[in-house]
Image (cartoon, rainbow, N blue to C red):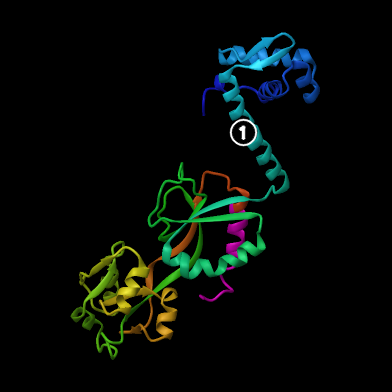
Amino acid sequence: MLPRRYLPSIPALMALEAVGRLGTASAAAHELALTQGAVSRSLQALEDQLGVPLLIRERQRLRLTPAAADYVTEVRRALQQLASASLTLRANPAGGSLNLAILPAFGMHWLAPRLARFTEAHPEVTLNLSTRLRPFDFAGSGFDAAIHYGRQDWAGVAYLKLMDESVLAVGAPTLVPQPLARAEDILTHPLLQMESRTGDWGRWLAHHGVVGQRPPGMLFDQFATMAQGAVHGLGLALLPTFLIARELAEGRLVPVFGGPVPALGSYHLVWPADVSPRAPLLSFRNWLAGQLDPLPDP
């Protein structure tokens, strides 16, 4: 915030704007439903506060100095913005913008198909989505909430669990025409993995009784890219089941060994724990909580 000495009162700014437009203190007083003396005192106080002359007195009229005329142009714009914001608040006290940070794959395949229902139920909320792959500091970020994958390890936030994740080992049918006989047979094929989850193949092997392995693989920073790599035969991939339903149904990806395996983390909606949620976030959070159990993955 600027020092208060640079923030004149709204009545003083309204008096200056009116005088600049109408040319006399009496006309400004009539428009503002004030006395001429009150307008004159406001103008004098404003000049004293800013430390510069604002008006040129010519006989019975008042004219803005060139610098004051530029100032009033900005003042008029600011007053109009304040009035517009007040009207919006009065007409829509529960509305506003909700800025949400999302994970790209989850946002595209799980959240996006459901959002039309939210916007239909809450037309007063404008939802803005941006991608963030890792936890961040909410302070100064401009975000009201975020989608987080993992454990409840994001400091200073509150959580709403959205769903657990299961991963499936898959590959292109041209790469693995038949399911593998043993879990360790994946080690004879090129492997794809997320750079943020380089231990996933080792955990998958341990789940199938093959311990002590941490195989290397081609790294990707997003599931969507890795899924396309698997479709085109670059290697085997561990992918969330909600992400590849279509590819499995169309035969572009096939399971290579066993069924889905529980992943290490879950998906959560998170928001700052030390800040009172704004009305748009409350609407979204409450709506989302009501959508979790009844809906199968799209």
Q: Does the magenta stretch include residue 180?
A: no
Q: In the picture, residue 246 is in which quadrant?
A: bottom left
Q: Determine the residue positioned at 62% across, 62% down.
A: 119
Left or right for 191, reference 127: left
Secondary structure at badge 1 equals helix
The three-letter amino acid code for the residue at tag 1 is: Arg
Left or right of 201 in this view: 67: right
State the image coordinates of residue 234 (x, y, percent, origin top left).
25, 76
Where residue 218 sits: x, y (%)? 23, 69
Question: Residue shown at 57%/71% (left/top)?
Answer: 293
Specify start and end residues of the magenta stretch as a single range.
281-298
Q: Would you identify the image quadrant in which residue 176 lies?
A: bottom left
Above or below residue 121? Residue 243 is below
Q: Is residue 39 above or below residue 103?
A: above
- Residue at the front extreme of this rendering: 59
- Number of residues whose C-alpha sits closer than 10 Å to that of mark 1, classed few (under 14), some (14–19) or many (20 or more): few
Give the camera-side residue of 124 and 167. 124
Query: What residue is rendered at 40% in x and 81% in y?
Result: 247
Position of 41 compared to 171: left or right? right
Q: Residue at x 65, y 32 (%)?
A: 79
The residue to which callout 1 is attached is 77
